[in-house]
Image: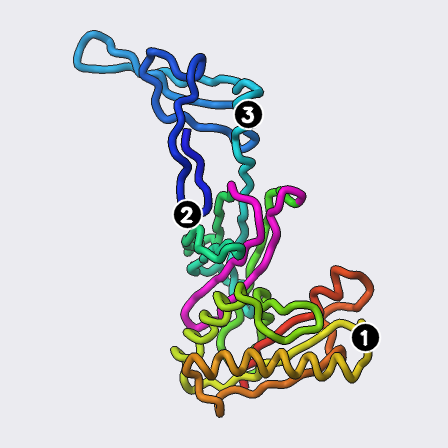
């Protein structure tokens, strides 16, 4: 048995009797809940042919404890304006440490995608299609949140006044220095801007309603400026970027809960 760990696989281990016997057992498949196993039992008929029998087993408790929990992420990609189903490139990135764990496409006719996750932790999902602003999503598949997740994704066509939240830009509380896991998303924004050199953008910073209004305004301005500086250092002309801070004046959702306040602490990009 070998299990995927990030982008690598664990060292294979013989499961031993009664899972492994002297028979020719092929292609063991473990169900997502780790309770059942299936394999093909290959038997020689004495001629040129073999016959196969599909075998179902219940895994012993000692083995079930070794199986990593498996969840999945799935959804549909559409055009935000027309609701047309889209074929798009999706990249799944584990944030701590930052590494790509999967690249796949949504179906051209149905817009559907699916990805299996067997490693807990925080993930970013980036969705790209030519002519559209890339979408970034952030979600937590830690042990306490290990549930199958559905994320339907609407992509905004690149046009004047279109805007998007950058969900994978991270700052420490009351700080404006970019945290290392922010670079994956920022580098994708750099690629987008370089491939559309005629575009100008506004980088806007937003906060929740905790603290003084004046302090929140200054913090949002510094965070927007920090993102702008990163883009300029990566080769984006400074005259193509405007950085603005709005403090708590433009909440995305009402500041009625900790979860809502988290959503309001954000960086947005708008095409000018």
Bounds of the magenta span? 118-144
Q: Residues within 10 Å of mark 2 (few under 14, many from 20)?
A: few
Q: Residues within 10 Å of mark 3 (few under 14, many from 20)?
A: some
Residue 12 lies in quadrant: top left
In the image, residue 152 lies in the stretch drawn in magenta: no
Disc 2 versus disc 3: distance between alpha carbons? 23 Å
User: In this rendering, is residue 238 above or below 122?
Assistant: below
Q: Is residue 236 left or right of residue 265?
A: left
The residue lying at 39 percent from left, 16 percent from top is 20
User: Which numbered circle lies on residue 64?
Assistant: 3
Disc 1 versus disc 3: distance between alpha carbons? 49 Å
Residue 33 lies in quadrant: top right
Q: In front: 85, or 139?
A: 139
In percent of width and height, residue 102 lies at: 43, 51
**Residue annotated with mark 2:** 7
Question: Which residue of the protein is positioned furthest toward the left in this rendering?
Answer: 48
In percent of width and height, residue 97 lies at: 50, 55
Which of marks 1 and 2 precedes in the sequence?
2
Residue 38 lies in quadrant: top left
User: Which numbered circle lies on residue 211?
Assistant: 1
Do the residues under discs 2 and 1 have CB atoms within 8 angstroms?
no
């Amino acid at each position: 048995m070998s299990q995927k760990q990030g982008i690598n696989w664990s060292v294979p281990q013989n499961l031993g009797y009664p899972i492994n016997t002297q028979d020719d057992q092929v292609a063991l498949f473990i169900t997502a809940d780790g309770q059942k196993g299936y394999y093909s039992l290959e038997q020689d008929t004495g001629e040129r042919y073999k016959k196969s029998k599909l075998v179902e087993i219940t895994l012993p408790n000692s083995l079930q404890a070794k199986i990593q929990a498996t969840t999945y992420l799935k959804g549909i990609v559409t055009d935000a304006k027309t609701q047309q189903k889209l074929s798009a490139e999706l990249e799944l990135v584990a944030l701590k440490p930052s590494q790509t764990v999967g690249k796949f496409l949504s179906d051209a006719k149905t817009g559907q995608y699916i990805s299996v996750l067997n490693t807990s932790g925080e993930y970013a999902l980036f969705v790209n299609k030519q002519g559209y602003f890339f979408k970034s999503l952030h979600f937590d598949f830690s042990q306490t949140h290990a549930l199958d997740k559905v994320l339907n994704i609407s992509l905004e066509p690149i046009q004047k006044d279109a805007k998007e939240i950058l969900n994978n830009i991270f700052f420490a509380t009351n700080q404006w220095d970019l945290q290392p896991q922010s670079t994956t998303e920022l580098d994708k924004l750099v690629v987008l801007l370089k491939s559309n050199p005629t575009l100008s953008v506004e980088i806007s910073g937003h906060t929740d309603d905790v603290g003084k209004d004046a302090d929140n305004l200054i913090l949002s301005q510094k965070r927007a400026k920090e993102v702008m500086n990163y883009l300029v250092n990566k080769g984006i002309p400074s005259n193509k970027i405007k950085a603005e801070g709005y403090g708590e004046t433009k909440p995305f959702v009402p500041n009625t809960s900790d979860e809502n306040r988290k959503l309001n602490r954000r960086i947005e990009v708008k095409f000018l």
